[in-house]
């Protein structure tokens, strides 16, 4: 796979291409370099000819638009955001260990990355198009091809108009100071900070302003959340909750699951993240099933839409340990204790306490 990714990336699938990083690579730098950035594809990776490329803005607008990339870049002032993208399937492997989740990729805590995105605020483009009264959702469609049953269609999804009008939502043409790489959506993707990664549609071809959420399979069927008692066979798709904001979550990157350590002061690290509004305030570690907790030190808060790295030192004596992490946000929310409480048949949004077992000699 000569695709410009680090050799230690975990390949879940080659066609469509899906890969994540090892925990060390995920936590290596605050801004994830492209070579360590996870790739989540449902279909083909289009090769877009930039000379023919046009973004269309259609639907409930006064003036529909058709913009080339140079037009978008020259007619609208650029803006940047540092934002963490996280897939809804992040940490699915822990849910699948409780009850199988057939047909979905067993992502560990590695469907995540943080980048500096540069582009045009979506709201500036919507303003020029002129939103008509009654519009409530902004739908996106990509240029990739996904084969499902007998149909072939582009990946799509939508966000509520209210979110679309926030300044952080960008039509991004650069990632980490370089033109958007092909695997990450060249020439243009939407970046919706705080939302599940699925809403950040790559190879963006069309923006449609509409009354209802997108009718695309990935908005109407996939990426809905069900309670633990609902099984695949009996699920009524319409009854699931359409996913939007990411939940509060935290992960231990070091040490790794199953690692054998030497007794003494042991460095522990990882990251914490929240979706919207309330911010990560506190990160805690427990070695006794959550009876007592030790506070970790968190990297200063620098960017509202980015993860926060944390670290701690634990003095470990010889023995077996399960290290548990949890985080709290500024509204006093914390994470669910047990993955069983939040198991769902599609395996989305696992944000239960993250646990790593190690033995110390
Ligand atoms: N956009 C298109 N066109 N096709 C896709 O398959 N996958 C989505 C989203 N945008 C996808 C897409 C999902 S599920 C995620 S998590 C993110 O892209 C992943 O972005 P990345 O591959 O740049 O990490």
Image (spheres, rainbow, N blue to C red):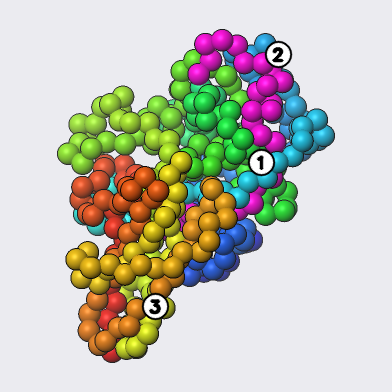
Give the CA distance from mark 2 to mark 1: 22 Å
* Above or below, comparing residue 230 to residue 310 in the picture: above
Mark 3 residue element: strand
Is tag 2's residue or tag 1's residue first in the polypeptide sequence?
2
Does the image show residue 361? yes
Looking at the picture, tell me which residue is in the foreground, 113 or 9. 113
Residue 164 x, y percent position in the rendering: 56, 29
Q: Residues within 10 Å of mark 2 (few under 14, many from 20)?
A: some
Q: Residues within 10 Å of mark 3 (few under 14, many from 20)?
A: some
| Mark 3 lies on residue | 313
Looking at the picture, tell me which residue is in the foreground, 310 or 11. 310
| Quadrant in the rendering for residue 53 | top right
Mark 2 residue element: loop
Contact flag, marks 1 and 3 (Cβ < 8 Å): no
Image mark for residue 288: none
Q: Residues within 10 Å of mark 1 (few under 14, many from 20)?
A: many
| Quadrant in the rendering for residue 233 | top left
Looking at the picture, tell me which residue is in the foreground, 185 or 322. 322
User: What residue lies at 23% left-to-right and 68% top-to-bottom?
Assistant: 292
Give the CA distance from mark 2 to mark 3: 58 Å
Image mark for residue 172: 1
| Mark 2 lies on residue | 63
Say which quadrant the C terminus sits in. Answer: bottom left
Give the magenta part as a residue range: 108-136
């Amino acid at each position: 796979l000569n695709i410009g990714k680090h050799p230690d990336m975990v390949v879940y699938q080659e066609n469509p291409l899906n890969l994540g990083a090892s925990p060390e690579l995920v936590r290596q730098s605050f801004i994830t370099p492209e070579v360590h950035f996870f790739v989540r594809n449902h279909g083909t990776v289009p090769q877009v000819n930039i000379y023919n490329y046009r973004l269309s803005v259609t639907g409930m607008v006064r003036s529909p638009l058709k913009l080339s990339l140079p037009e978008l870049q020259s007619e609208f002032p650029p803006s940047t955001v540092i934002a963490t993208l996280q897939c809804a399937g992040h940490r699915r492997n822990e849910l699948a260990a409780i009850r199988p989740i057939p047909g979905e990729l067993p992502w560990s805590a590695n469907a995540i990355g943080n980048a500096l995105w540069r582009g045009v605020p979506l709201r500036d483009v919507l303003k020029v198009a002129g939103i008509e009264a009654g519009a409530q959702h902004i739908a996106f469609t990509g240029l990739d091809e996904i084969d499902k049953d007998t149909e072939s269609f582009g990946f799509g999804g939508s966000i509520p108009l209210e979110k679309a009008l926030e300044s952080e939502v960008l039509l991004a043409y650069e990632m980490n100071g370089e033109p958007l790489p092909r695997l990450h959506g060249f020439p243009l993707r939407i970046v919706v900070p705080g939302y599940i990664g699925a809403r950040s549609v790559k190879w963006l071809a069309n923006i449609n302003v509409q009354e209802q959420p997108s009718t695309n399979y990935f908005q109407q069927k996939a990426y809905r959340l069900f309670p633990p008692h609902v099984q695949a066979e009996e699920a009524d798709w319409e009854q699931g909750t359409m996913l939007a904001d990411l939940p509060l979550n935290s992960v231990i990157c070091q040490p790794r699951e199953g690692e054998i350590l030497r007794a003494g002061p042991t460095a522990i690290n990882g990251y914490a993240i929240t979706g919207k509004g309330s911010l990560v305030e506190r990160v805690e570690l427990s070695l006794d099933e959550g009876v007592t907790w030790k506070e970790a030190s968190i990297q200063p808060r620098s960017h509202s839409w980015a993860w926060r790295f944390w670290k701690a030192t634990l003095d470990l004596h010889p023995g077996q340990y399960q290290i548990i992490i949890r985080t709290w946000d500024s509204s006093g929310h914390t994470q669910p204790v047990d993955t069983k409480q939040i198991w769902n048949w599609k395996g989305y949004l696992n944000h239960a306490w993250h646990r790593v077992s190690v033995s110390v000699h």
